[in-house]
């Protein structure tokens, strides 16, 4: 896929939007597309960006290096696997990606309240969401502790894989149950972290805008989680 073969809804041409925004920030269109991909999925890897954009490994690496030199994104080792380099936007990179997202949605004819906007938390995490729209308040955002949640899930998956090997090896059932209880506790801990962030951001936001649907969905999720 070339830099001008940009996925878009039927009847919408994003090319001019990308070119104008790229020119505004002194970037190439492919560089801007990388920023957008990382903004939509903070903590992703270069490989994941390449797969999302259908760029070659060499091309993504060159684009990431150029953006890092411009201090628009950073690469840092994963806490769970130091060999994996995770990408995160800097404040400047976030501003460029957010401007693009807003222009894309405005190009689709959305009202200002429907246009996505982005917040940067103290830890550098990006939260992008929308307000309003003809269906009332609605929003989606990346988890405020995405990195912590993913790291915990990775550890839980690794622990569960160990339990599977124990069962295959015919180890004592009591030992298997002890290990399963540890996995269960880790998953519950991760769920509590997600719930805490959801209450801190989504629910507070929903209360401010009278979004009863989000509150009802939270109650249903809590009921399922504590069963």
Image (tube, grey):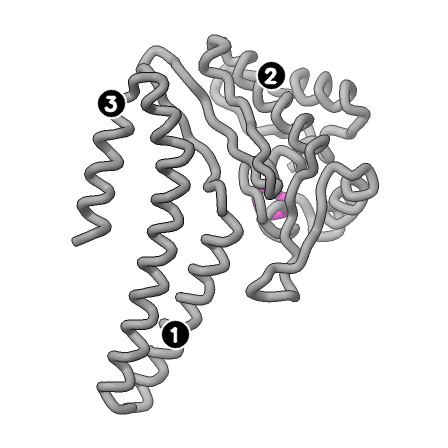
Secondary structure beneath dot 3 equals helix
The tag earlier along the polypeptide, 3 or 1, is: 1
What is the quadrant of residue 131 in the picture? top left
Q: Nearer the viewer, mark 3 or mark 1?
A: 3
Do callouts 1 and 2 mark residues in contact (Cβ within 8 Å)? Answer: no
For the point 59% across and 62% down, which residue is it?
79
Question: Where is mark 2, residue-wise?
Answer: 103
- Magenta residue span: 50-54
The label shown at residue 212 is 3
Q: Nearer the viewer, mark 3 or mark 2?
A: 3
Which part of the image, by quadrant, shows the C terminus? bottom left
Is residue 11 found left or right of 45 in the rendered image? left
The tag earlier along the polypeptide, 3 or 2, is: 2
For the point 72% across and 20% down, which residue is it?
19
The tag earlier along the polypeptide, 1 or 2, is: 2
Q: Main secondary structure of the magenta part?
A: helix
Q: Give coordinates of residue 148: x percent, y percent.
A: 50, 54
Disc 1 residue crowd, few under 14, some 14–19, many 20+, Cα 10 Å: few
Q: CA distance from mark 3 to mark 1?
A: 40 Å
Q: Nearer the viewer, residue 66 or 225?
A: 225
Q: CA distance from mark 1 to mark 2?
A: 44 Å
Question: Where is mark 1, residue-wise?
Answer: 161
Disc 2 residue crowd, few under 14, some 14–19, many 20+, Cα 10 Å: many
Q: Is residue 44 above or below residue 82?
A: above
Which part of the image, by quadrant, shows the N terminus? top right
Q: Nearer the viewer, residue 61 or 174?
A: 174
Secondary structure beneath dot 1 equals helix
Is residue 19 found left or right of 198 in the rendered image? right
Q: Is residue 47 above or below residue 26?
A: below
């Amino acid at each position: 896929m070339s830099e001008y073969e940009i996925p878009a809804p039927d009847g919408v041409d994003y090319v001019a939007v990308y070119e104008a925004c790229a020119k505004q920030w002194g970037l190439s269109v492919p560089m801007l597309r990388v920023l957008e991909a990382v903004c939509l999925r903070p903590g992703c890897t270069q490989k994941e960006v390449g797969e999302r954009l259908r760029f070659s490994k060499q091309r993504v690496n060159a684009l990431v290096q150029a953006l890092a030199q411009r201090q628009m994104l950073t690469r840092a080792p994963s806490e769970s696997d130091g060999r994996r380099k995770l990408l995160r936007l800097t404040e400047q990179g976030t501003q460029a990606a957010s401007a693009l997202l807003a222009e894309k949605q405005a190009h689709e004819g959305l009202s200002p309240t429907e246009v996505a906007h982005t917040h940067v938390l103290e830890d550098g995490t990006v939260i992008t969401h929308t307000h309003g729209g003809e269906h009332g308040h609605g929003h989606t955002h990346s988890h405020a502790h995405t990195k912590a949640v993913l790291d915990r899930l990775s550890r839980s998956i690794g622990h569960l894989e160990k339990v599977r090997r124990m069962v295959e090896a015919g180890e004592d059932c009591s030992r298997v149950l002890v290990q399963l209880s540890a996995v269960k506790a880790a998953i519950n801990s991760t769920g509590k972290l997600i719930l805490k962030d959801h209450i801190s951001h989504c629910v507070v936001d929903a209360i401010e805008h009278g979004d009863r649907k989000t509150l009802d969905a939270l109650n249903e999720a809590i009921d399922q989680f504590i069963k």
